[in-house]
Image (spheres, rainbow, N blue to C red):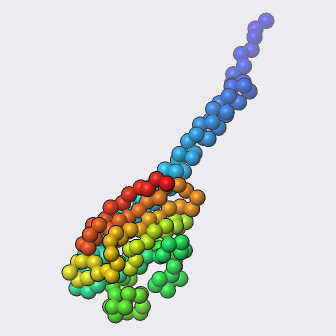
Amino acid sequence: MERIKIKGYTLIEIMVTVVIIGITLLVVTPNLIGSIRRQTLESNLLGLSSDLKNSRADAMVEGTRTVTLIVGVGQMPQDFDEDGKEEHYITFIDNNRNGTFENGDRLLYRNNWGDVRVETNTLSPIVFMPQGTIFSTQTTPWILSIKFPNYESEYSLELLSIVGMTRITRIHL
């Protein structure tokens, strides 16, 4: 009598494989989520830093002042330019020199960071003059820090000089 060879995996082998995959996912998922959040925060501040540099260049090229408005601490995104879309910040050419976006002002940059919350804001408004320097009644340091709600890491953007040099730092709480 010949034995028939059965092909395939046993139930025990399949269960062990599923358990190993489950344990791996339990270990990897929190690290992956944290990494995605860190990258998002850093990317948001890199975008703002880039827009500030471009805003300075626009002020110099256009020969006029540019203004960047950023939401305040704990505020939700706002509809700064009244187009029905909410932003964490906008940058515009301030034709009437009043520091608010109105008809006649030209929108340059804007961004909404989603669920990100502003923790510290001594930046807003940032006004670049035609000479490429910042006009501010505030004293340094000019700092903006952001984080996700219920997440320990916080990132900050510090404006280092009146010509718009910035530094992005991760703050561990």
Expressed as whole percent of the image width and height from the top left, the position of residue 171 reads: 43, 56
Pick whichever, 40 or 132, lies toward us: 132
Q: Residue at x 46, y 68 (%)?
A: 120
**Furthest residue toward left:** 131
**Furthest residue toward top:** 1
The vertical placement of 137 against 18, above or below, is below
| Figure quadrant of residue 26 | top right
Expressed as whole percent of the image width and height from the top left, the position of residue 83 reads: 50, 84
Pick whichever, 85 or 38, lies toward us: 38
**Furthest residue toward front:** 139
Q: Residue at x 63, y 36 (%)?
A: 23
Can residue 50 be seen here? Answer: no
| Figure quadrant of residue 133 | bottom left
In the drawing, does residue 53 fall left or right of residue 13? left
**Furthest residue toward right:** 1
Pick whichever, 103 or 38, lies toward us: 38
The vertical placement of 167 against 22, above or below, is below
